[in-house]
Amino acid sequence: MQVIIIEDEKPSARRLQRMLEKLDMQVHTMLHSVEESIAWFQNNTHPDLIFLDIQLSDGLSFEIFEALDIKSSIIFTTAYDEYALKAFKLNSIDYLLKPIDEEELEAAVKKYQTMAPKPSVTLNFDDIKQLLVNPIEREYKKRFSVKIGQHIKLVNVEDIECIYSENKGTYLHTVDGRNYLIDPTLEELEVELPPNQFFRVNRTFYVQINAIKDIISYTNSRLQIKLQSYQEQEVIVAREQVKNFKDWLQ
């Protein structure tokens, strides 16, 4: 079975890919824009199943289906609410509201596997465009709650210098030099942190853009980041992330 993901937020796409791999489903391709998707469909065999985000960086994903005759089954991965999605009049398998829950994903996959015959795509584009005149903005995490003894403290994302993993735990480091243990993993935070503020520079670190004090060339074409107060260990931008990091800084 051939599966592809169409999602403009690459961290969300990678997270979904990992979740599908746990269900023994291999993702053949990940596409990130309308233009890229149309080009891919024109030159490749159409997949059995598409995990489809609605709002892509260069338009609505439905524009792909206006340009091409695609009969693949669809599972939506979207931030749009249930009522708007039902009004799309699309014969899709299911929809998953972000952030995607593993149990809901498994249920949607099982639903696809048991359905026969597979549904084809039937879109009412006029209704869709009318509904999406004012698209819903994605909501990102604004604060974390951390436990200090018997007390709960709220930490705003603006007060975080970096988020890192250490000894199987995830920690916030704040502008006042404090470290706080939190529950989510770095992978789970990929779809919760505002991408204009936080960047995952390597396997164990997110940095906050306003906390960066200096950026220094490092060995093997990498970069070293100096933060305002965090000094416990070196913060290195992985070589494969250097280009994306430089783009993010813009």
Image (cartoon, grey):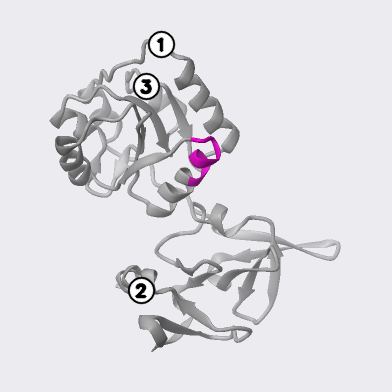
Write the residue at 39% across / 46% down: 137
Neighbour tally class for label 2: few under 14, some 14-19, many 20 plus, Cα within 10 Å? some
- Residue 136 position by quadrant: top left
User: Which residue is denoted by mark 3 in the rendering?
Assistant: 92
Question: Which of the pair 238/59 is nearer the observer?
Answer: 238
User: Which residue is denoted by mark 1 in the rendering?
Assistant: 116
Question: Which of the pair 143/33 is nearer the observer?
Answer: 33
User: Which residue is denoted by mark 2 in the rendering?
Assistant: 242
Q: Amino acid at mark 3?
A: Ser
Q: Is residue 180 left or right of residue 246?
A: right
In the rendered view of the protein, which quadrant contains the N terminus? Answer: top left
Q: How far apart in space, not on screen, are marks 1 and 2 (Cα)? A: 46 Å
Question: Which of the pair 108/44 is nearer the observer?
Answer: 44
Q: Amino acid at mark 1?
A: Ala
- Residue 187 position by quadrant: bottom right
Write the residue at 33% across / 37% down: 54
Q: Earlier in the sequence, mark 3 or mark 1?
A: 3
Q: How far apart in space, not on screen, are marks 2 and 3 (Cα)? A: 38 Å
Q: Amino acid at mark 2?
A: Val
| Extent of the magenta region | 18-24
| Above/below status of 28 relative to 69 | below
Write the residue at 35% across / 32% down: 2
Q: Name the dominant secondary structure of the magenta segment.
A: helix
- Residue 83 position by quadrant: top left
| Above/below status of 233 relative to 110 | below
Question: Which of the pair 208/67 is nearer the observer?
Answer: 67
Counting from the top left corner in percent of width and height, residue 105 is at: 52, 32
Q: Earlier in the sequence, mark 2 or mark 3?
A: 3
Counting from the top left corner in percent of width and height, residue 164 is at: 60, 69
| Above/below status of 84 relative to 166 | above
| Above/below status of 88 relative to 36 | above
Is there a contact, CB below 8 Å, between mark 2 and mark 3? no
